[in-house]
Image (cartoon, rainbow, N blue to C red):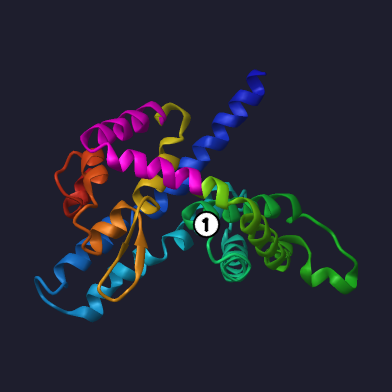
Amino acid sequence: MKRYLNKLMHELSLLGKAMLVPITVMPVAGIIGLIFSADFLNIPVIAGLSSIVFGNVDFLFVLGAAGAYSKAKDKTTVMVGAVVAFLVFKQTLGTLNPDVNAGVFGGILVGIAVAYTYNHTHKLKAPAVLSFFANEKCVVSLSPIIGLIFAWLFSVIWIYPQNAMDAFGVWLGGMGAVGVFVFIFLNRALIPLGLHQVLNAYILFEMGSYTNAAGEVVHGEIPRFMAGDPTAGWFWIGRSGSGAFRFQTGNL
């Protein structure tokens, strides 16, 4: 029992690592978006970098998860497999069920699946005619299949967790200061298990929605804050204690 518990704790610690690495790019993207926004230097081409980063958070998380859970010394092959699997996953899911928003959780789960596939196939032997696709390259060959499988699964079952999380987000957001306190409390309580990053991922990158002036819909506290949503940012502010996301570099 203790052995299984230790293994579980190890896996959860990897999850925290997988989610922490992509988050490190957020302060830089936010600062660049602020400095070059219309309020300051007004250089839209450079300011758009912020939107690119926040608009592809799920892509960052699939790479983070694949890298964290893979046992490869050279993770290039795993990363390529993760990119292919996620591109197939996202495109196929949008066709099968446009109402489903997999978000960062889709990226995390696909990345973990690709990593585990690599861990179990990188020593796989194959007949001479198929030798090119064996060993470490096997995960790249299988990655489109992984993307298809997860797209089908998400199209069928993810709507239920999505609705539950949306309801939780509406309840938490409607609680005002009490909701911020609940978030901070849960965040600290989950740290020993490494699950605080799961909560952070949902609150910061999935909770709520906002349509900007260009008609683009963004989700999550940070992307909504950067898009100009006046109701966003309070949970991130409460978590950091800094007073504003724009000064998150030191807190991170």
* Depth order, front residue of 157/227: 157
Residue 155 image point, x, y percent: 62, 59
Q: Quadrant of residue 128?
A: bottom right
Q: Quadrant of residue 97?
A: bottom right
Q: In the displayed image of the protein, which residue is found farthest to the left?
A: 40
Q: Is residue 112 magenta?
A: no
Residue 3 image point, x, y percent: 65, 23
Q: Quadrant of residue 215?
A: bottom left
Q: Is residue 171 magenta?
A: yes
* Circle 1: residue type: Ala
Q: Tag 1's secondary structure?
A: loop
Q: Is residue 186 left or right of residue 151?
A: left
Residue 185 image point, x, y percent: 32, 28
Over which residues does the magenta segment extend? Answer: 163-190
Q: Is residue 91 left or right of residue 171?
A: right
Which residue is rendered at x = 22% and y = 39% of the image?
A: 238
* Depth order, front residue of 67/230: 230
Q: Is residue 180 visible?
A: yes
